[in-house]
Amino acid sequence: MKTLFISILLLAGTYTASSQNIGVQAGIRLNTSTVRYTGVDISRKAGFEGGFSYQHTIGLPGLSFRAAILYFNQEFSLENDMGNNTGITYHFMEDNLKLPLIAEWSPFPAQIKPFVQGGIYTSYAISGNIKDSDSGNSLKYEKAGHRLDYGIVIGAGVYLTRYIVLDIKYEHGFAGRNLMLGDQTVYVCNKGYSASLRYLF
């Protein structure tokens, strides 16, 4: 399934790159990832998401496809409370590149027009860190393939003008990933909401 997702994204990205609707986007990403590690309190932080997009309109009214190259960061913390105001907290931080392929449908041909969207994505963790109160180290993964994620995207948005777009998306990852914490693993399955503004040239 990973190979299928990546192949579809690469082919579609090549096709849509010829589009004249090139855009830039930036926004906030709310991390709602599933994190499993027993005996700790888990907290998640919001992060940044932004990058470039290519949009291609096809023959059907209101329907277009959008490919993008996006950067996003995500963070979460594991807090082990030992009582008597003692304990230790580990902070996990990842920098990721993401390649989404989105189908967008806008049923109303007006200047201010809403749309719905859905598609697939794949992402890759290009770097990461794990820190506690005393030190920090590069983030390690149980397997090299655990840097990779893939999943689905659904959402909605609105064209505020011909050039400015507001959209909100939910992403649900399918790849369970194991991050190393000493000789133990922390299970993570990416999920999140994002809200962004996109400008079309």
Image (cartoon, rainbow, N blue to C red):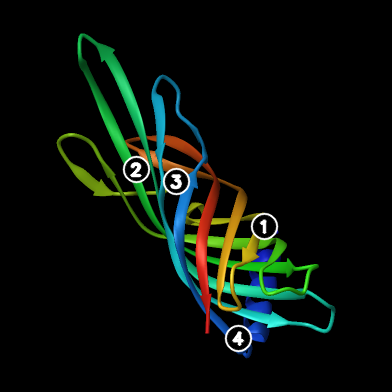
The residue to which callout 3 is attached is 142
Secondary element at image label 2: strand
Question: Upstream in the sequence, badge 1 or badge 3?
Answer: 3
Secondary element at image label 1: strand
The answer to whether the residues at label 4 and label 3 have Cβ atoms under 8 Å apart is: no
What amino acid does circle 2 point to? Answer: Phe
Instruction: Identify the residue shown where x is 64% and y is 60%.
Output: 157
The answer to whether the residues at label 1 and label 4 have Cβ atoms under 8 Å apart is: no
Give the CA distance from mark 4 to mark 3.
35 Å
Question: Upstream in the sequence, badge 1 or badge 2?
Answer: 2
What amino acid does circle 1 point to? Answer: Ala
Q: Quadrant of the N terminus?
A: bottom right
- The one of 134 and 201 positioned closer to us in this rendering: 201
- Where does the image place residue 197, in percent across and percent down from the top left? 50, 65
Query: Going by the image, does 71 lie left or right of 1?
Result: left
The answer to whether the residues at label 1 and label 2 have Cβ atoms under 8 Å apart is: no
Q: Nearer the viewer, mark 1 or mark 3?
A: 1
- Find residue 200 and name its label: none
Quadrant housing residue 185: top left
What amino acid does circle 4 point to? Answer: Ala
Question: Upstream in the sequence, badge 2 or badge 4?
Answer: 4
Residue 98 position (above or below residue 136): below
The residue to which callout 1 is attached is 156
What amino acid does circle 3 point to? Answer: Glu
Instruction: Identify the residue shown where x is 50% and y is 41%.
Output: 188
Secondary element at image label 4: loop
Give the CA distance from mark 1 to mark 3.
36 Å
- Find residue 17 and name its label: 4
Secondary element at image label 3: loop
- Find residue 92 and name its label: 2
